[in-house]
Amino acid sequence: MVIDSFLNTLESIETITDSQQVAKLSQDYHTFSPVLVPQLAGKVGDIVVRPANEEEVIKVAAACAKYRIPITVRGAGTGNYGQCVPLHGGVILDMTKMQNILWVKPGVARVEAGVKLAALDKKAREIGWEMRMSPSTYRTATIAGFVAGGSGGIGSIQYGLLGDRGNLLALKVVTVEDTPRVIELRGDDVQKVNHAWGINGIITEVEIPLGAAYPWAEVIVTFADFLTAAKFGQSLAQADGMIKKLITIFASPIPQYFHPLQSYIPEGTHPAFLLVAEPSLELLPGLVQQYGGQITYQKPAQEVGKGLNLAEFTWNHTTLHARNVDPNITYLQSIIPPEKGLQLVEHLYHHFGDEVMMHLEFIRMNGAVVPAALQLVRYTTAARLNEIIRYHEDQGVFIANPHTYIIEDGGRKVIDPEQLKFKELVDPYGLMNPGKSKLLAHK
């Protein structure tokens, strides 16, 4: 068998062939989508390989090229779109053993692909810096997984999105060829691999800029009215003199899914979850009062990280908590056009009612404050879900569809021609994560 021949070439590299383990490591959190679950059912790899260093990655890449075995690169599997689910079997390349933090300097860090975001953040804080942004899965997510499948998160209100110029400095990738090459991409060239779901080379190292580390306090503010909560969030987001890392607004009844926090959120109220730098906290009560809110919870920076972490109820952890209570809930990912802003948010809030529960995450895009949304949807049928998506798009909302495993049908809409050219260069046999692009399927 081809896999047996492949195995013989790997020598001392760690491999997993146990079918249950392989099946487990062939999955991610695409189970958030009732559309993807049946489409990806039974899609598993043939073997898992865990390289410990770049040299071992090169050996695996060469063997996959030699035997024409598909290769799906995996980090911690915290993605939501089936990015690391293999459609055509083959090798699952688990990068989680490559955990060396190569160096951290003021304002910049270089790490191996499998470094966990929380570990990098902890190391950077030793010299007064921190990651600019991270997903709500920062405790378990890996840096290369974030680059390949993420887009932004906690910190995006200050620094924008991962794909914005300057938020990713360099990548090192290994090609999947008969004689693999190691390629360093710097500057704008990183976009050839950024958010490409592992179709464009095996990321082995990442160099990212850091932000100044602040003592972050956690705050919950509640409001009697959702739109007032949203307006408060927008005002805080636009207060450039106040340093913040997170501004999350929830429409009732979403807080019912946050059991550990319910004592801080009176029934029927609409909360804002905030991470604010302690030097800016003094200014917060005046803004809260201006919008008629109530501060119901506040944790000083020295206590953050002990017990409950407010950030782990935001971004897509919101969906996780809701689905733990009601597995029929799914979600959307939206960006509200800034020219329509909260007026459109208000329209959608009233139009859908509790069928589409509003969850806003304020971010910066192109220098402007924008309400992004991860709405919770009470799922009934795929047809109804598509109707909801179409209605949003008809109103001008950009939907990064989390109910497809095709790159172009999700956030991209089209695949970047530069990424396509780079794909042909580094993966001539089309072995990397095959089936995840419509365009590539027809080539």
Image: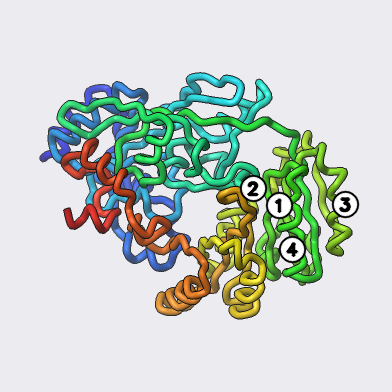
- Asked which secondary structure carries label 2, the reply is helix
Q: How many marks?
A: 4
Location of mark 4 (residue) = 231
Percent x, y for residue 317?
58, 54
Residue 417 visible in the current orientation: yes
Q: Nearer the viewer, residue 438 or 22?
A: 438
The residue lying at 62 percent from left, 71 percent from top is 344
Please tell me whether mark 3 or mark 4 is closer to you in this view.
4
Sequence-first tag of 4 and 1: 4
The alpha-carbon separation of the residues under discs 1 and 2 comes to 7 Å
Sequence-first tag of 3 and 4: 4
Depicted 138 relative to depicted 288: above or below: above
Three-letter code, disc 1: Ala
The residue lying at 50 percent from left, 23 percent from top is 101
Sequence-first tag of 3 and 2: 2
Location of mark 1 (residue) = 237
Taking 229 as reference, is 325 left or right? left
The alpha-carbon separation of the residues under discs 3 and 4 comes to 15 Å
Taking 301 as reference, is 41 left or right? left
Sequence-first tag of 2 and 4: 2
Three-letter code, disc 4: Lys
Q: Are marks 3 and 4 in contact (CB under 8 Å)?
A: no
Three-letter code, disc 2: Ile
**What label sits on residue 285 in the rendered view?**
3
- Asked which secondary structure carries label 4, the reply is helix
Please tell me whether mark 1 or mark 3 is closer to you in this view.
1
Location of mark 2 (residue) = 157
Residue 136 visible in the current orientation: no
The residue lying at 21 percent from left, 55 percent from top is 441
Q: Residues within 10 Å of mark 2 (few under 14, many from 20)?
A: many
Residue 232 occupies quadrant: bottom right
Q: Are marks 1 and 3 in contact (CB under 8 Å)?
A: no
